[in-house]
Amino acid sequence: MLPLFFEFHSPTKVVYGPGLVSDLHAELSQVGARRYLLVSDRGLEKLGLPARVAASLEDAGVQVVGSFLDVPENSELGAVRACADEAAAVGAEGLVALGGGSVIDTAKCANILLSEGGDLVDDYSGAGTLTRPLRPLVAIPTTAGTGSEVTQAAVILDEAGSVKLSFSDKFLLPTLAVLDPELTVSLPPRLTASTAMDALTHAVESYVSPQWSPMSEALAAGAVRLIFDHLEAAVADGSDLEARGALLTAAAMAGIAFSHAMVGCVHGMAHAVGGLCHVPHGEANAILLPHGLEYNRDVVEERLAGLAPFVNGLTSEEDRLDPADRVIAAIRNLAGRLNKAGVLATRLRDVGVPEERLEAVAAATVMDGTSFYNPREVVADEILRHLRNAY
Amino acid sequence: MGSFTSSEQFETMLGGFFEHLTTVPSIAEKLLASKLIIRFKYTDPDVVLVVDCSGDALEIRRGDSETTATVEMFMTADVAHRFWFGKVNLMMALTRKQMVAKGPVPKILELLPAIKPAYQLYPTYLRENGYAQYVID
């Protein structure tokens, strides 16, 4: 049965191709801006990526009038302001973000200040606060996880108050997303695994979300298939461009899916262990995904079953399970194989979560905003039981 | 034109409901725990209501445009009315710009589970306080 209402808005132009970043002439000529500030980070600078991209942008006929490479691991307000100041000082007409979610989110918010001026926190934090399009933003992801290159959201840390500020607006959607798998080959196996599991969690949670639509489910299911078919190959051989490209594409598809359909208690638990025990988001999602699905299983059985054709890696015995249980088993098996390969933790105890913190994690999960979009009510006692299973 | 023509009437009706919620312990306690100050700015007709969770007790202030709010929510009176029946999906409304939220949206989302029981209280409140004609089936 179709939902009574859905909206689908995904105007970001997505282009894909190995080596594409070396020839962006066709795409950039349609974007409109001529003078760009390149936004990236110091880690990528050491790999020479910003210089390579800047050269190719110049070859494409646009000017790179400056660069801002001081984006921290987690985007911060100070960096956003400094980036916007730099963009204004060099007369940038647009921004190119080269990096992971932190770099892209920094560029999104710097673009607000560059385009509109004002105070980022007082005037624009929140949802729907922008009233007109911003300057062009080209997003070139170097990780395959957050999907920020195709979402309308950005999260920035206010380092003074240790508060995470969220920005959500259709005008934050990048103008162009360039998916070039060559840019992800240097991602270490551990990060490859956890970022891809983050994308898998986006896909699976959005697929079973009460907010699903036929548009979001198609993208989510496609992302699940790509991740199951290619994640282990990318971990085994980081230079496998086919596998890298599949993960990059999957992350973008899952990003579009979850930014429309939302996520649920897996993310709620991951946010809680991230906030209380500092577990990286991708690793937390990877550990908690099968447990969150078990929590929701009975109310999402039919929807979850729809993902069964898109997963693999089951034993002959598991192949005889109900479709929904096959999906959960396949996810558990995938995480298990990555664990055996030494690139992914599968238990909370292995990522430094103290057992005595589980009750607090359960309580924080209930209060997380994702609870509202979970397919069933999020109850602390039951969540605690599943957290103990994950411990 | 929306369903409500008088600012005074809408302020009394919705402000009264908010005040009623302060007497429901299961809801009030969770709101207080948030420590948020939320200003609702309604249009068609224009009404401002502040829900102040920053003190020891919940305070509802009508027409308060002075207090510095943690979050400001903008919407029409009709959207607000339908929201309290549980008939407006917050994320969808934000996406469609039926609502605009200034400030930390995740903190607002965190409150949604706490106020969910209020959806059942709203029609009862309307019927018991002379606003039965506004009950939506």
Image (tube, coloured by chain):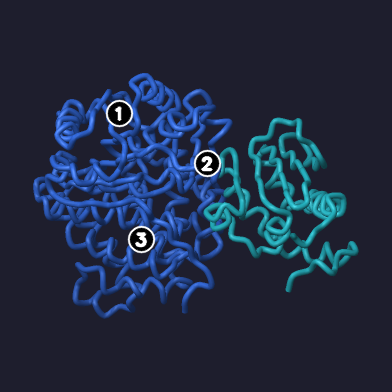
Q: Is residue A329 visible?
A: yes
The chain coloured blue in the image: A
Q: Are marks 2 and 3 on the same chain?
A: yes
Mark 3 — residue? A290
Q: At x 42% / y 66%, what residue is drawn?
A: A208
Q: Earlier in the sequence, mark 2 or mark 3?
A: 2
In the figure, A108 relative to A248: above or below?
A: above
Q: CA distance from mark 1 to mark 3?
A: 42 Å
The colour with which the image depicts chain B is cyan
In the figure, A165 relative to A91: above or below?
A: below
Q: Amino acid at mark 2?
A: Leu
Q: Position of residue A201 (x, y in %)?
A: 35, 56
Q: Amino acid at mark 3?
A: Pro
Crowd around label 1: few <14 · some 14–19 · many ≥20 (10 Å): many
Crowd around label 2: few <14 · some 14–19 · many ≥20 (10 Å): many
Chain letter behind tag 3: A
Q: Amino acid at mark 1?
A: Leu
Q: Position of residue A342 (x, y in %)?
A: 18, 47
Mark 2 — residue? A130
Crowd around label 3: few <14 · some 14–19 · many ≥20 (10 Å): many
Q: Position of residue A359 (x, y in %)?
A: 52, 47
Nearer to the camera, A156 or A173: A173
